[in-house]
Structure formats: structure tokens, C-alpha cells
Amino acid sequence: MKNKQPSPGSGVLRSLYASGPSVEDNMPQTPAFPGQLNTGGFNNNVYPSTTESSPGLYYQDNNLVSGSLEALIHHLVPTVDYYPDRTYIFTFLLSSRLFIHPYELMSKVHHLCTEQQRLGDPQADKLRLKKITPKILQLLTEWTETFPYDFRDERMMRSLKELTQRLAGWDEVHKKAISQMSQGLIRRLTVLSQFEEALVKINATATERLTALKAKPQAATQRDLLSICNDPFTVAQQLTHIELERLSYIGPEEFVQAFVHKDPLDNEKNCFSDHKKASNLGAYVDWFNRLSYLVATEICMPVKKKHRARVMDFFIDVARECFNIGNFNSLMAIIS
């Protein structure tokens, strides 16, 4: 059977059940781990594996395997002849939050860029600054694009603004790149805020309806899904749109945050203790459960067995269409 692809539909489930959707240069770089795709970047050369050339870092077969926090932070910051591999940037920015707050990491990066690269020195070599500035901008761009939610912290935005102001003074091209990066970050954070506000309204509306139903159950109007849309493919399409929209707002750091379990005997402050919970991941879990409850409710609503069997057959077809589309999340929610 040829797989069908989702296309914008009538929004059946959206209205009923609340939707919720380089510069090329040659310089040494941390090697990618075996089996990983070449992520590209400024270079593809192997970074020296000797501890003399990188004190505090430990390599095995030319692969970086461990290091002190300070050494790893230094390894994150570009130099004139070095830019970290994108796999290292992502991995370190994601895992470092277990040991240091993102705003503290940004502060250290800011300090290293300013002091080591002499960004604040008007007598600094202009050619040297011209080489290092695009690399620092590239690092900041990757950070803001991959982990934009880190920048909801005012301390992060303050450090970012201070550093970019130093970088912007050297070239109009850099000013344009900084402007584009800042606009993209603000746009992403604005969309996130709007999505979270929509979730709050959705949950409030659902609570109000449930309260009204409990107060006057006889006034409830029963509307089954099949009477609204009896095409399994259309329903599967709408489910896929909802899935894609909600998944798009989940940041990778939310998974780290969700699976970190603080030891009750550990008195040290957790790096997530002043962060709110992984709200987008939690909202997605709520959506998964809501879909499961919807399917169960639709099956149990009919009084006659043959009508229940018809509803079950319908959702089996919906699950099959979800499978054909590649929407395994809705598939699992339906069959669970």
C-alpha cells in the first residue's frame, strides 16, 4: 500500500479536542564519534589527541572521552585556528546543565571570548578579530537555535547582548548576522509564549466544561466522533498535525530535565531547581493521555454492542492510517 502523506485538513480534532502545528575553513576539530553523521562546520580535521595540546581533556583513539568542566568549557570556545565540532557543541550544551546553569556557562563563555580573544582591546589585531568573530557568532547562533529556551533567563540575554555588542563593532556584515540571530531568537521565544498561553486556555476551557458537566449531567449534549468525521484518513491527518505541532515545541533539554532524579540525601542545589518543569514535554504527555481517553470514551458511549464494534473498527482504521503516515505516537495512544 502506498503511504499517504498528511495535508492541511478541516481541523476536526483541532476544534473539538483542542490542538496543540558555514563558513568553510581548515582548522582542527573534535572528531565525530563512530557511526555519527558528518555534521559539517568550519572544518573536518582531527583535533590533537594528546593531553599536552589540550590539558584537562582525555582522548581515546582520537575521541574525546572525558575532561574537567573548565577544560570542556575552554574546548567549547572557538579560537582563530579552531572551531568545535557541532556534535560536541550540542552534546556539551545539553549535558553541561547537569553540572552548571546555562547562564553560568554563558557567563564563562563571554569571559573567555572577551579576555582570551581580546575583544575589548582596541589595539587588538584587526585581522585576528576578523577571523575569530564569525566563529564566535557561529557558536552563539548554534546555541540560540538549538536551545532557545535557555534565553528566557534574563541573565542569559544580558550576557548575549553584551557579547554581541562587542562583536558588532568590527564589521557591518557581523552586525547584520547578529541582527538576524537576535530576531530569530526573539521570534522563537514569542511563538513559545503564545503556544504556552494557548495551552493554558485549552486546559481552562476543558476544566470549565467538566465542571459544568458534573453540575448538570442531563444538559450534556452527546456528540460522537463518527457523526462529525467518519473518514479514518482525515482523522489520522488531523492527529498528525497536532502531534507535529506539539512535538516542535519540545526542547532537547526537557528530556534531560525530566529524567534527572535528585537524591534526597544530596543537599547540593540542583541546576534545574530554579527552572519550571518541562512544560512542553508534560503538555505532550497530557495530549497522549487525552487521546487515549477519547478513544476509550468513544468506544464505551454506544449502548449496543454492534455500535461499539463499529467504533472499534473505525479506530483500528485510524490507527492503521497513522501507521501508514508514520505517526506512531498517535498509533500507540489509540491502541493503548
Image (cartoon, rainbow, N blue to C red):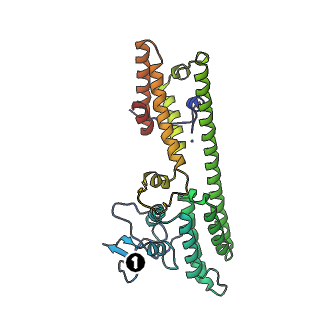
Q: Which residue is mark 1?
A: 56
310 vs 35: above or below: above
- Residue at 62% across, 62% down: 181
Question: Quick one: quadrant of the C terminus?
Answer: top left
* Numbered disc total: 1
Camera-side residue of 153 and 189: 153
Q: Viewed as shown, does residue 102 lie left or right of 32?
A: right
State the image coordinates of residue 24 (x, y, percent, origin top left). 51, 71
State the image coordinates of residue 256 (x, y, percent, origin top left). 45, 55
| Secondary structure of the residue carrying numbered label 1 | loop
Q: Viewed as shown, does residue 186 lie left or right of 66?
A: right
67 vs 238: above or below: below
Kindly give the residue lying farthest to the bottom in the view shown.
Answer: 123
State the image coordinates of residue 81 (x, y, percent, origin top left). 49, 79
Residue 138 visible in the snapshot: no
Q: Quadrant of residue 199?
A: top right
Q: Quadrant of residue 167?
A: bottom right
Q: Viewed as shown, does residue 57 lie left or right of 158?
A: left
- Residue at 41% across, 22% down: 312
Kindly give the residue lying farthest to the left in the view shown.
Answer: 61
253 vs 221: above or below: below
State the image coordinates of residue 233 (x, y, percent, origin top left). 48, 29
Camera-side residue of 331 and 269: 269
- Identify the amino acid type marked 1: Gly
Question: Quick one: quadrant of the N terminus?
Answer: top left
